Amino acid sequence: MKNPMDQSTIKRINRARILKVFRDHEIIQKKDLAEGLGLSITTVTTNTRQLIEEGLIEETGIAESTGGRKPVVFKFNKNARVSFGVEVTPRMVTLIMTNLVSEIMEMVKFSIEGMTLPQALKVVETQIDRLLENHEIEKQDCLGIGLALPGSVDDGQKLLLNSPNLHVSNFSFEGFEADCGIEVFTGNEANLAAFAEVILGTVKPIKNAVYVSITDGVGCGIISNGEVTKGFTNSAGEFGHMRVSDGPKVCSCGRTGCWELFSSERALIQGYNENAAHAISTLTEFFDAYAQNDHIAIELLNRYIAHLAIGIENILLGLDPEVIIIGGEMAVFLKSILSSEESKEHRLIFSEIAPLSAVLGSSLLPFKAMFGF
Ligand SMILES: [Zn+2]
């Protein structure tokens, strides 16, 4: 027999379920809340009273009465708390501040080229202080800072175990947390992007999917039964480093023939720069050249798509997901280039929150306990 849950666990779960309804609906009647969740009016009243005290909801009188007593209606104060999401890539940091319903209130991007990770984090800390001050938000109303990192992460220890792309290993974020004075949460960028797809994306009803995040590298997040699967050592989904070639080119992980050497953004940009007369640094520049029938860009993209397909076929063979979600800035371009037949053949769909999936996923981490995601 299962152990009965203790009272405090039940209370915590009820509170999270109620808050989740507020997150989804913003305005709701007390009786709908009780009926929808199968809770007694007393339980709902105890919780709503507490949430009003905490400033998370307020009573509002806009519902039409259908006769009898005027219905009690609550409104969610979606701006009562905020969280920060930070995506760190080798070249850029993207920082967002969101409210409780994941609306982006601020977004800052800055280059970290030539900076060490501690230097980049110092800039993040300064930007966070500035944003809180601009919006007159107290630190206690900020529920945390989520970090989306390119590499394997020990979430519990707030440790970046290994990131070949950032050239760090066993990097602890406890110092950063102490400097900011705000709780810090960490996660692998592809896993967080997959998490964002589950909570915010348009693929919500899909329970089994693989998210392929194409950025400077290629990371994947595996969604199984509606949850992100991290594996025994927290490193599931490292398909970017599966061998797809016996070529001699060395990957950032130290091995050769890895999929990301052929299917990352960097592969496309470097490939172009090795062959063309002028250098480019962004995908937009690459696809501008492609649109102008630049033969180097056309040839490279064809080769790129062929390599992308090899990896995707391997994932389909191994995991048989309902769909493969393509994320990263690349999703925006590939969506317009691949035909619907090609996409269908490989069960591809394109993220509608790309290229912000990972940073949105990181901004959700501080809300996990509150809403019970
Ligand atoms: Zn590799």
Image (tube, rainbow, N blue to C red):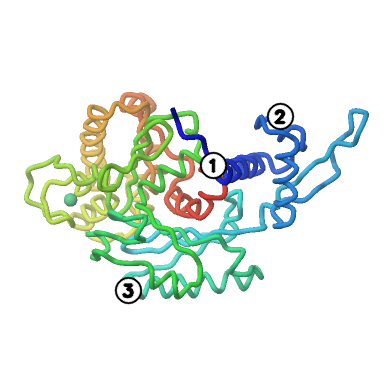
Name the quadrant of the N terminus: top left
Is residue 237 in view? no
Helix, strand or loop at disc 1?
Answer: loop
User: Which disc is residue 35 wearing?
Assistant: 2
Considering every residue shown, the one lying at the far right of the view is: 68
Q: Residue placed at 43% from the left, 43% from the top? A: 195
Q: Residues within 10 Å of mark 2 (few under 14, many from 20)?
A: few
Q: Position of residue 57 (x, y in %)?
A: 72, 50
Q: Position of residue 300 (x, y in %)?
A: 23, 45
Q: Earlier in the sequence, mark 3 or mark 1?
A: 1
Please identify the quarter of the rendering in which residue 92 is found: bottom left
Q: Vertical placement of 373 versus 312: above or below? A: below
Please identify the quarter of the rendering in which residue 310 is found: top left
- Which residue is tagged 1? 6
| Left or right: where 219 falls relative to 97 | left
Mark 2 CB within 8 Å of ligand 1: no
Please state which amino acid type lies under the numbered disc 3: Met
Q: CA distance from mark 2 to mark 1?
A: 23 Å
How many marks do you count on the picture? 3
User: Which disc is residue 115 wearing?
Assistant: 3
Q: Residue placed at 82% from the left, 47% from the top? A: 60
Q: Earlier in the sequence, mark 3 or mark 2?
A: 2
Please state which amino acid type lies under the numbered disc 2: Glu
Residues at marks 3 and 1 touching, judged by CB atoms closer than 8 Å: no
Q: Nearer the viewer, mark 3 or mark 1?
A: 1
Q: Residue placed at 45% from the left, 54% from the top? A: 362
| Left or right: where 201 falls relative to 256 | right
Q: Vertical placement of 372 versus 37: above or below? A: below
Q: Residue placed at 37% from the left, 26% from the top? A: 322
